[in-house]
Amino acid sequence: MARKRRSGEIFSMSFLDCMSCGFGAVILFFMIINSRSDVTPNDQTKALQAETNKLEIEVLQGRKNLALARTSIQKLETEDEEAKDQISIIKALIAEMQAELAKYDKDTLAKIQAIEKLQSDIKALQDEVKRLLALKKEGEAVGERARSFKGEGDRQYLTGLKLGGERTLILVDRSASMLHETIVNILRRKNLPESEQLLSRKWRQVVASVDWLTSQFRPESEYQIYMFNNVTEPVIKGTDGLWLKADDIEQLDDAVRRLRRTVPKNGTNMYSAFQVIRDLNPRPDNVILLVDSMPTMDAATSSKSVILAGERLNLFTAATQLIPSGIPINIMLYPMEGDSRASVSFWALALKSRGSFISVSHDWP
C-alpha cells in the first residue's frame, strides 16, 4: 500500500523578512525612548541653570552691597578719627591761648600798676608845693563844709557842677557796668570774687566822687543817697523816704563806707531811680546823678537777655517823664564803650532841667 504524502503549507513571509521587522521594531523602540529622554532633561536643565544664574546674580549684588557698606564704614571711621584729631588740636590751641592771655593779663596788670605808681609819685612831688600853699586856704574853707575830703592836690575844678540847695539827692548807678569801661572786662570781672570786684578802678572812682560830693555839703543842709541797679534803695538802710542832716559827720562817713562795700551788679533800672525824686517829701531842690550808660530795664526783673540801643533810649525817655519840673538834674557821666547815645541823652536832660552835665575824667577826683 502506497504511503500518503503530506500536503505542504505555504508561508508567505520569509525568515529574513521577520528578522528585519524585528530589528526594525527594536530600533524604532529605542529611538522613541531616546527622543523622549532628550526632551525632558534639557528643559529641566535650562530651568535649573536659570535659577542658578539668578542666585549667582543675587550673591554678586549682595557682595557688592557688602563691599560698599564696608567702604562707607571705613570712610566714617576715618572721618571720625580726623574730627577727633581736629578737636584735640583746637582744644590744645584754646588752652595755649588761655595760658598766653592769662600771662599777658598778669604782665599787663603789673606794668600798669608800676606805671600808675610812678605817675602817682611824680604827681605827688609836683603837687607838694601847691598842696603846702593851699593848706591855709583849705583850712579856712573847712569851717564852711560838713566834712573834708582828702584828694591829690587841688582837684576842685568842677566849677560847672551845681552843689547848692537845702536838700540834695545823690543817685548812684551800681549796675554791673560800673565794673569797667569795656564790655569784655565787665563780663570777666563779674566772674571774679566780690572782694576783687570792689577793687575795680571805675567803681572806686564813683565812690571817691560821692566822697568828694558829700564833703561839699553845708552843715545846715539835708541830703539823701540812693543807689540803683535793677532796684533802688538808700545807701543807709532804714532811711527810705527820709532826709538826713549834713552836720551828722558820722552818718555821712558811714554812708560812704557802706557804698564802698557795695558790689556793682545786675542791670540798670532808671525808672525806679527817678521815682525816688517824685516820692521824697519834701522833694529835693538839687539832684546829682552818677551814671555811665542808658537804662536796660524798667522793672526789677526782665525777660530780655539782649536789649537794643533804640529800646534803651525808649526806656530812658519813659523814665525822665517821672522827674517833677523845676528840679535841676546834674549829670556826672562816667566812661562806657558802646553806648553812643548816652552823652547826648544825658546832656539834653541836664539842659532841659537847667542842671549841669560833666563827663568825668579818669583821674578825678
Image: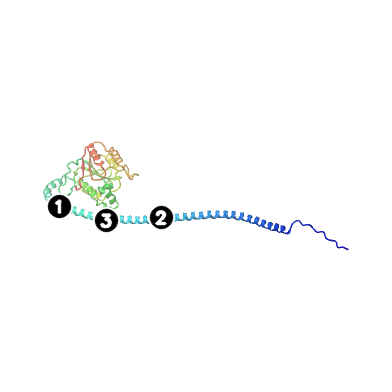
Residue 281 vs residue 14, the one in the foreground? 14
Distance Cα–Cα, label 1 vs label 3: 32 Å
Question: How many discs mark residues in the rendered view?
Answer: 3
Viewer-side label of 2, 1:
2
Asked if marks 2 and 3 touch (Cβ < 8 Å), the reply is no
Q: Which residue is mark 2?
A: 75
Mark 2 Cα within 10 Å, few/some/many (few <14, many 20+)? few
Q: Is residue 12 left or right of residue 252?
A: right
User: Which structural element holds mark 1?
Assistant: helix
Picture quarter containing residue 77?
bottom left
- Marked residue nearer the N-terminal end (2 or 3): 2
- Marked residue nearer the N-terminal end (1 or 3): 3
Furthest toward the front, the residue is: 2
Residue 166's spot in the image, x, y percent? 21, 40
Viewer-side label of 1, 3:
3
- Residue at 20% x, 42% y is 358
Residue 310's spot in the image, x, y percent? 30, 40
User: Which structural element holds mark 3?
Assistant: helix
Instruction: Tell me the number on the disc at residue 271.
Output: none
- Marked residue nearer the N-terminal end (2 or 1): 2
Please, what is the three-letter code of the amino acid marked with disc 1?
Ile
Q: In the figure, 200 relative to 274: above or below?
A: below
Q: Which residue is mark 3?
A: 100
Colouring used for the render: rainbow
Residue 354 vs residue 17, the one in the foreground? 17
Please, what is the three-letter code of the amino acid marked with disc 2?
Lys
- Residue at 43% x, 55% y is 71
Asked if marks 2 and 1 touch (Cβ < 8 Å), the reply is no
